[in-house]
Image (cartoon, helix red, strand yellow):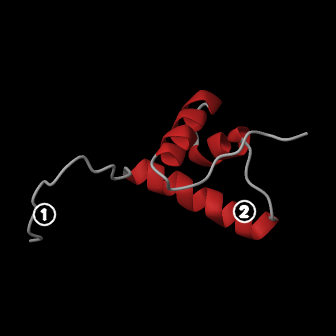
Amino acid sequence: MIEPIPFVGVVRVPTQRQIEVAQFIVKFHNESGRSPTTREVAKHLGCSQNNAWRLMKTIAKKGEVCHQEKVN
């Protein structure tokens, strides 16, 4: 059994779902040379675009990925 780490402060540990999103984004970017759209993330996860957007926003806040608004 793994020994628990003493609580030192607020730690923003990503959830398994957030890790899945981050890994998908990185893989998609490495394969296509661009970041996936919210629609593409939602399709991969089998969830709504709204939920995909929330997950992407959360992992960006936690520093797992960088987020930039679409530039035309």
Quarter of the picture containing the C terminus is top right
Front residue of this view, candidates 20 and 66? 66
Secondary structure at badge 2 equals helix
Residue at the limit of the structure toward the front, as seen here: 9
Q: Is residue 23 above or below residue 44?
A: below
Q: Quadrant of residue 71?
A: top right
Q: Is residue 41 above or below residue 48?
A: below
Task: Give the image location of residue 55, x and y in percent.
Answer: 52, 40
The answer to whether residue 66 is left or right of residue 30 is left
Pointer 1: what residue? 5
Which residue corresponds to the image point at 74% horizontal and 54% vertical from the top-left? 35
Q: Residues within 10 Å of mark 2 (few under 14, many from 20)?
A: few
Task: Give the image location of residue 10, x and y in percent.
Answer: 24, 46
Q: Residues within 10 Å of mark 1 (few under 14, many from 20)?
A: few
Q: Is residue 66 above or below residue 29?
A: above
The answer to whether residue 36 is left or right of residue 65 is right
Task: Give the image location of residue 7, x and y in percent.
Answer: 12, 54
Q: In terms of sequence position, does the residue under pointer 1 or pointer 2 come before the other?
A: 1
Pointer 2: what residue? 29
The answer to whether residue 4 is left or right of residue 33 is left
Which residue corresponds to the image point at 8% horizontal and 69% vertical from the top-left? 3
Residue type beneath disc 2? His
Front residue of this view, candidates 46 and 57? 57
Residue type beneath disc 1? Ile
Judge depth for marks 1 and 2 and give the one in front.
1
**Mark 1 to mark 2: distance in Å?**
34 Å
Residue 29 shows in the view: yes
Which residue corresponds to the image point at 38% horizontal and 51% vertical from the top-left? 14
Quarter of the picture containing the N terminus is bottom left
